[in-house]
Image (cartoon, rainbow, N blue to C red):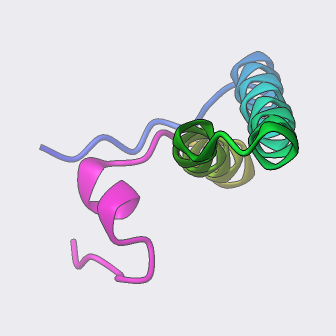
Amino acid sequence: MKRSRTLSSVERVVALCLALTWLCGAAFAFYFAWLHSRWGIGVAALGALLYGAAWLRVAARSRLLTWAELAAPWRRLRA
């Protein structure tokens, strides 16, 4: 079953706020990992960066992503 419900403007703002929060957190974690040579935190920051990018795509497309779109964003799925 395919859902294609678009997000409201309030939901888009929330998605954008989530994206910015995750991206800023990732930037701070990368800085902390570099400053204190804590590379485990750098790996976690990479995950936060990818999660923030996913929320940024949700805000840009104005709809929630499917698992297939999240795993392989370069592929176009046929309906």
Q: Dividing the picture into quarters, in which one does residue 26 lie?
A: top right
Main secondary-structure element of the magenta-colored stretch: loop
Q: Is residue 19 above or below residue 39?
A: above
Number of on-image labels:
0
Q: Nearer the viewer, residue 33 or 78?
A: 33
* Residue 74 spot, x, y in % from top left: 44, 82
Would residue 36 appear left or right of 57 to someone viewing this image?
Answer: right
* Residue 9 spot, x, y in % from top left: 80, 26
Residue 30, magenta (yes or no) = no
Q: Dividing the picture into quarters, in which one does residue 63 lie?
A: top right
Q: Nearer the viewer, residue 35 or 58?
A: 35
* Residue 58 spot, x, y in % from top left: 61, 44
Give the residue drawn at x 59%, y 47%: 39
Q: Which stretch is magenta?
A: 64-79
Residue 73, magenta (yes or no) = yes
Q: Is residue 15 above or below residue 23?
A: above
Q: Dividing the picture into quarters, in which one does residue 24 lie?
A: top right
Give the residue drawn at x 36%, y 61%: 69
